[in-house]
């Protein structure tokens, strides 16, 4: 899912679609502030979802020779280390420090959750198909309206945003089938 599509959907809901689209196309700078604020709101929502509701997982395979694996060597910004395994897939003991992991020397695979990097308008969201576009749109609208001081609208969008998050986690109850009777 493209960031631009989500941000423009939010702009459409605000009634500023044409001006924001023209800004992103480089044709008109009159809504530059709104366009940049919408993009900033997208980044806030994406990061918030990853930290609070839907963790993003990554696996990196790295080689270490000094029993120390720097977090900067990972492709993403780690939040929580889930598992560390050796080249054969066996679990390895590790210890977490503020800037590195202490692991046995050799090749290891690190599974972790991460926060997404800030996106530009042409990037793809890290969530892909994990979350619906409308979830992001509601979150962006809530953040945008709060930043603009439109608190009543922000409350309404925040409510829709929270309901969309809840719908991700709700499962339908199983229907019980009546037993079959053979006559």
Image: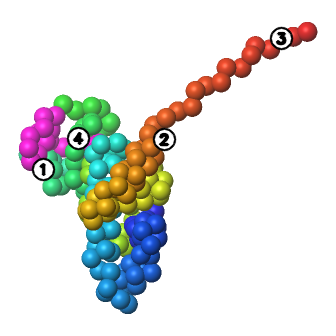
Residue at image point 71% right, 20% down? 177
Residue 8 visible in the displayed image:
no
Q: Which residue is under mark 3?
A: 181
Which residue occupies the foreground of this view, 17 or 150? 150
Residue 182, image x, y percentages:
87, 10
Taking the image as shown, residue 128 lies to the left or right of residue 100, namely: right
Q: Which residues are magenta?
A: 94-113
- Kindly identify which residue carries mark 4: 80
Judging from the image, what secondary structure is the residue with disc 1 in? strand
Q: CA distance from mark 2 to mark 3?
A: 37 Å
- Name the residue tied to disc 1: 70
Q: Residues within 10 Å of mark 2 (few under 14, many from 20)?
A: few
Spot occupied by residue 78 in the image (x, y as percentages of width and height): 22, 48
Labels 1, 2: front one: 2
Magenta segment includes 112: yes
Q: Nearer the viewer, residue 96 or 33?
A: 33
Name which residue lies at 12% across and 50% down. Answer: 70
> Is residue 111 a member of the stretch shown in magenta?
yes
Give the foreground label among 3 and 4.
3
- Say which residue label 2 marks: 167
Secondary structure at badge 4 equals strand
N-term mark: 2 or 3: 2
Rendered view: 83 above or below 1: above
């Amino acid at each position: 899912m493209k960031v631009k599509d989500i941000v423009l959907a939010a702009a459409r809901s605000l009634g500023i679609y044409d001006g924001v689209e023209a800004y992103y196309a480089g044709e008109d700078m009159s809504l530059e502030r709104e366009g940049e604020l919408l993009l900033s709101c997208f980044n806030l929502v994406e990061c918030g979802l990853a930290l609070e509701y839907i963790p993003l997982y990554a696996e990196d395979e790295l080689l270490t020779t000094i029993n120390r694996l720097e977090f900067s060597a990972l492709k993403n910004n780690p939040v929580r280390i889930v598992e560390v395994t050796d080249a054969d897939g066996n679990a390895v003991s590790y210890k977490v420090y503020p800037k590195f992991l202490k692991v046995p020397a050799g090749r290891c695979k690190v599974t972790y959750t991460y926060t997404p990097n800030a996106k530009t308008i042409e990037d793809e969201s890290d969530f892909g198909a994990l979350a619906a576009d409308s979830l992001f749109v509601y979150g962006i609208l809530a953040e945008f309206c709060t930043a603009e001081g439109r608190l009543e609208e922000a409350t309404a969008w925040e409510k829709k945003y929270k309901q969309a998050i809840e719908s991700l986690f709700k499962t339908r109850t199983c229907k019980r089938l009546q037993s079959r009777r053979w006559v």
